[in-house]
Amino acid sequence: MEVAEKDKKQELKEFIDSVKDKEHGDSYLIAVLHKAQGLYGYLSREVMDTIAQQMQIPTAHIWGVATFYHYFNLTPPGKYVVSVCLGTACYVKGAPQILEAVKNDLKIDLGGITEDRLFSLQLARCLGACGVAPVVMVGDKIHGEMTPKKVVEVLNQYRKAEKKQ
Amino acid sequence: MDEKVTITINGKPYRVDLDQTIMEAADSCGYHIPRLCYHPKLSIEGACRVCIVEVEGMKNYIASCAYPLFDGMKIHTNTKELRQARRDIVELLLDNHPEDCHVCERDGNCELQRLAYAMGIRHRHFAGERKHYHKDLSSTSVIRDPDKCILCGRCVRMCSEIQGVNALGQAGRGFHTVVMPAYDMPFAESVCTTCGQCINVCPTASFVEKNYTQELFAKLNDDSLVKVAQIAPSVRAAIGEGFGLPPGRNMEGQTVAALRKLGFNYVFDTQFSADLTIVEEASEFLERVQEKGKLPMITSCSSAWMKYMEQFYPDLIENISTCKSPMSMGSALIKTHFAEQIKVDPKNIVSVAIMCCTAKKYEAQRPELMVNGMQATDIVVVTRELVWMIKSAGIDFLNITPEEFDSPLGMSSGAGTIFGVTGGVMEAALRTAYELYTGETLVDIELNSIRGFDGIKVGTITMDGKEIRVAVANGLGNAHNLLEIVRKEPDRYHFVEIMGCPGGCIGGGGQPYAAANSIPLDTDCLKARAEALYSNDRKKTIRRSHDNPEIQRLYKEFLGRPLSKKSHELLHTHYKPHEPRGIASRKIRAI
């Protein structure tokens, strides 16, 4: 179930209220940004403006933090987030080629989103599935022992499932 | 905290205060360690690593700006290896910097250029990837060029710690870090107040004023136009620095002469319109006091402060004096009364303001300040631009014969002069308000309690038994601190003066760059500029605005009386809240 917009707003406000008056309240900014991204999937300008007003932290500073950490998305993610693992085990088993294949197939770069908003692409640094390296995570599902060819097949499965719906 | 320790620098022993950094101690012992991101009025960033030194017993070189002393510390500032390391650091900065010094706005005024020379860099050894971004040309006042930026962070700290504006931040990471407004939005749409202090502290040309000199040269060459200039008080106190003179030389007559040589038909003084502002503002203040209007009344002549107010303190709009700034009052008169006098269609007059201030470029284009549907001030050039124009036109500024201002907008009192220094508007206003209120002349007119460079100054003056409490702030960060008090205790002060820049207009964002042996916004430099204006005030026989005979004549022949209908039409305005709303930082440092 999608949480209603109003409830998301309320939950974020309550979280900010619970931390902002603590000692070094400003230092909870990263936690607040995490919370917001958890609720909305990404950090929109509107959400960052709200956080700025509620925490009384200037927007230029929030923008600095949000752009510093790769974890924070500044654009809405696709329905399925594709995370290509570039951890050591995956890397030596050919992850760079997997990444290249995904980029070519989706026609987007890292941090991008496909036109149909079905997929967005990001990197992962070890998903704890090194035994089946190289791995790619699509949504919350891990796909192991990938090859440039197999990964395209995996993506096609998601496309097919989407068409059926 | 006056504990002393013994350290050695380059083998020589020194007895110094413990409570300081290596750099501060070295400064006091006569060793100027090269530096870049350090500025004494800003927090320590330790980002550039140019100020590294060797400390015996330590594995790595350390940044002297950020490291405290300890007893027995053995410091080396100039060993062969250290010099090499420091040079490498500067070479790496240069590697990601355009090689375009000879076509750069700051050629000859650039700290990076000077540093590279001092390090002995005569070849570019490294050639790696270089960043490429678009210039942000959206602002009326300040151009941002990320390609020239070396990420020292001085602008970011200035904007947040001294100005409390927080328009700038460092976004992204590593090689992709860029100094920018929030959301990478155009400067013009950000909370930037256009004060230009980022330009003052930038070591390179990553921030420069929007330049209108070519446009002005074109107008000056157009014989169908009547070219009228006005000069702000602080320009004359600083312009000499642009020609290599020490700070504090009053170059009023030389500037007037140079403007005539450049092709201006009339050269007027913003100090005249400052006198007019004072008569209007003092009258407005007394009206508010007597008719229980909104108090405290807050001054409105600083353009950066007006934009700051609209975005950070819109709740205080009713407290803001409705008086336009001296520049805009002067321009309004030039396009109306003066145009009538010389029988010229105001459309054929080019009204040019020579200002110490980049924010005046923004003010000039405000729709609120239009006169009869025309922009009253057509072009604003700052002190730096005028210096360049004078040099470019081949005018021998230092040996020029000084000349007088034109009449009628050229005569000024001492009160008009001190408008350029923090506290000066208040002092000038009180000189007039006292006399208008009590009918007696204020004898001791030098109000020392509101002079000087403290961030916030307060004073009282008694008028016919009524105590008037006044407060003065310079720099927008200090203004924020003062206005928080005003918000909480609206009855505490009757009259508040705010100037957007450190030290007032004399420290404006359009003033000449710091000399090679100095630093931006050096306190001694600001003091010298202030003294140039205070001594000008002392030399004047007329020191109160309302005693200026040209002002009296203007009221008699044109305006009628202060706050008349005509005055309101031409000399007063109202401001509106402005988006985006700003958030002042909690890290403001008082200076």
Image (cartoon, rainbow, N blue to C red):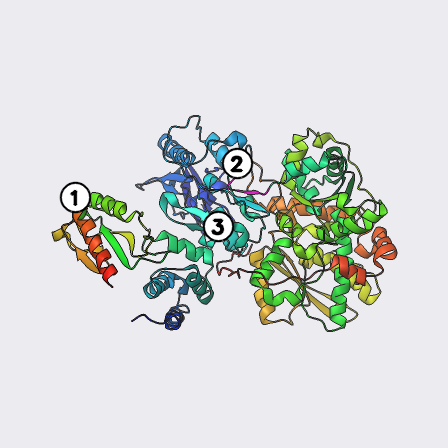
Is the same chain shared between marks 2 and 3? yes
For disc 3, the neighbor class at 10 Å (few under 14, some 14 to 19, many from 20) is many
Residue B261, position in %: x, y? 75, 33
Which chain does the numbered disc 1 sit on?
A: A
Residue type highlighted by circle 2: Cys
**Foreground tag (1 vs 2):** 1
Q: Which one is nearer the viewer's eye here, B462 or A78?
A: A78
Query: Which residues lie in the magenta part?
Result: B205-210
| Tags 1 and 3 on a common chain | no
Q: How far apart are marks 1 and 2 (CA)?
A: 48 Å
The tag on residue B110 is 2
| Number of numbered callouts drawn | 3
Between label 1 and label 3, give the one nearer the viewer: 1
- Give the residue at mark 1: A92
Q: How far apart are marks 1 and 3 (CA)?
A: 42 Å
Percent from the top left, x then y, of residue B108?
A: 55, 32
Q: In which quarter of the image is residue B210?
A: top right
Most foreground residue, A3 or B208: A3
- Disc 3 chain ID: B
Q: Which of B11 and B174 is in front in this view?
A: B174
- Amino acid, disc 1: Val
Please check the rendered image and state whether residue B206 is part of the magenta-colored stretch, yes or no.
Answer: yes
Q: Is mark 2 on a helix, strand or loop?
A: loop
Tag 2: Cα neighbours inside 10 Å, few (<14), some, or many (≥20)? many
Badge 3 is on which residue? B156
How far, Cα to Cα, is label 2 from label 3? 18 Å
